[in-house]
Image (cartoon, rainbow, N blue to C red):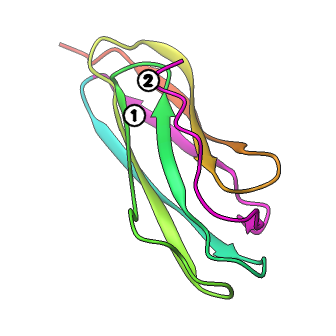
Amino acid sequence: PADHIVPKGAPTTIDFGGKQRFEFGTIQEGEKTTHDFEFKNTGKNPLTISNCKAACGCTVPEWQKTPIMPGETSKIHVIFNSEGKIGQQIKAVTVIANTEPQETIITMSGMVEKEAK
């Protein structure tokens, strides 16, 4: 598929320190919540993230476009817009990089309540 860009560079490893999930709690519909998923390049080669994609436009990931050197840390900034979303939400972002495996999933989840009028 066109949206699956093959990562460049020799394989390396990415470590989110066991923090690939973020629970944002309860928010009101229409609120935006953000989270920085911090990670470290634990491999021996530069880490290149070729894409971060969410299943819908309500979740927007931002990431470093330049290679992350071995031992360095970086983050993926994720913004979730709850407009039009009610109830339990689980939003996944697929991180595509020159890692083994090539795809890593990070998630944000929580409850969105309808705003009381």
Q: Can you tell which mark lies on residue 112?
A: 2
Where is residue 23? Give x, y as percent: 60, 44
71 and 76: which is toward the camera:
71
Residue at the far bottom in the pictured view: 71
Residue interval drawn in magenta: 1-29
Residue 23 in the magenta stretch? The answer is yes
Q: Earlier in the sequence, mark 2 or mark 1?
A: 1
Q: Measure the C-alpha gap from mark 2 to mark 1.
A: 5 Å
Question: Picture coordinates of residue 109 (x, y %)?
Answer: 58, 34
Which residue: 51% across, 14% down? 87
Q: Which residue is mark 1?
A: 27
Q: Is residue 45 above or below residue 65?
A: below
Q: Secondary structure at mark 2?
A: strand
Disc ID at residue 69:
none
Q: Nearer the viewer, residue 67 or 114?
A: 67
Graded by Cα atoms within 10 Å as few (under 14), some (14 to 19) or many (20 or more), the crowding at tag 1 reads: some
- Give the percent coordinates (x, y) of residue 46: 62, 76
Task: Choose top left, top right, bottom left or bottom right for residue 16.
Answer: bottom right
- Most common secondary structure along the magenta stretch: loop
**Badge 2 amino acid:** Val
Please say if 70 is above or below 14. below
Q: In the rendered image, which quarter is residue 106 located in?
A: top right
- Position of 86 compared to 31: left or right? right
Residue found farthest to the front: 9
> Mark 2–mark 1 contact, CB under 8 Å?
yes
The amino acid type, in three-letter code, at marker 1 is Ile
Determine the image quadrant of residue 47.
bottom right
